[in-house]
Image (spheres, rainbow, N blue to C red):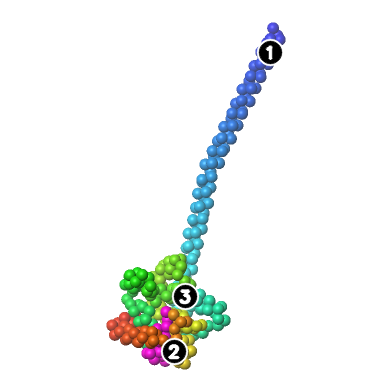
Amino acid sequence: MLRMAGLRSTDKAFSIVARAAYSWGMAKKAARKSSGKKKQANQPKKTQTFLSRIRRWVMRGAVVVACVFLALVLIYSVVNPPITHTIWSEWRRLGKVERDWVPIEEIAPVMARAVVAAEDANFCRHWGFDVNAIRDALEDGGNRGASTITQQVVKNVFLWQGRSWVRKAMETALTPVVEIFWSKKRILEVYLNVAETGEGLFGVEAAARRNFGVSAAELSPVQAARLAAILPAPRARSVTDPSVYTRRRAAAILDGAATIRADGRADCFED
């Protein structure tokens, strides 16, 4: 009897141990499954967190860049730009460049009018973009330029040459900012001093001295018109030995300069 009771106790003990072991194993298995599910659930969260960080850094970078450009716009409204990307590129290519900054008061008025007549006849009447010129360019299949003087200043002073969409988008964003903080007279003054006017030449002062041996203040109407006529392609066109096209273009510019003076389209930059 005692032996049978002992066996029953032993079996009962083994049964309890077995059930406990089974329960422990099942609990461990369930814990592993739960842990795996948590890891899987956390993976999308980690991905979302990483993407959120990237977005935040991109936004912060964009804000910093915008602030830098805004600061430069404000500074250059009163301080003359010391250099531009094009001037720097030409200096690297040629080893030297000629450029003499002069205030607009020391540039012949006919030179300013000639440039406006040649490049942007409605300069005084738009806010940075000439909608009519853009429409005409689109109708012409994009073969005709539609950039205003303000857009060219933005490209020359703050950006770089080229036809990339990134540059064009930045130019479009900066143009109204320049129009807000700069006067029309200041925009034209900067343009007349940074525009490429020949091989290694920048600004109308350097061009006047090299081509005609006079200062920008002493330019005659014909000389001013010829300088304005070469601006779209200053390296390909000659001021001192103009082609038939350049002569005709200069004559048209001379007439245009007289027209904008007569109809008031030069009032925003002439006293």
Circle 3 sits on which residue?
157
The secondary structure that dominates the magenta segment is helix
Q: Residues within 10 Å of mark 2 (few under 14, many from 20)?
A: few
Which quadrant is the N terminus positioned in?
top right
Circle 2 sits on which residue?
241
Residue at the far left: name it: 263
Q: Where is residue 216 in the image (x, y as percent from the top left)?
A: 43, 88
When asked about the image quadrant of residue 262, the answer is: bottom left
Q: Are marks 3 and 2 in contact (CB under 8 Å)?
A: no
For image coordinates 53% across by 43% down, the residue present is 42
Amino acid bearing label 3? Val
Q: Give the range drawn in magenta.
A: 217-232
Q: Where is residue 214 in the image (x, y as percent from the top left)?
A: 45, 92
Sequence-earlier tag: 3 or 2: 3
Q: Where is residue 9 in the image (x, y as percent from the top left)?
A: 67, 14
The magenta stretch spans residue 231: yes
Which quadrant is the C terminus positioned in?
bottom left
- Between label 1 and label 3, give the one nearer the viewer: 3
Residue nearer the viewer, 61 or 219: 219
For image coordinates 49% across by 68% down, the residue present is 68
For image coordinates 64% across by 16% down, the residue present is 12
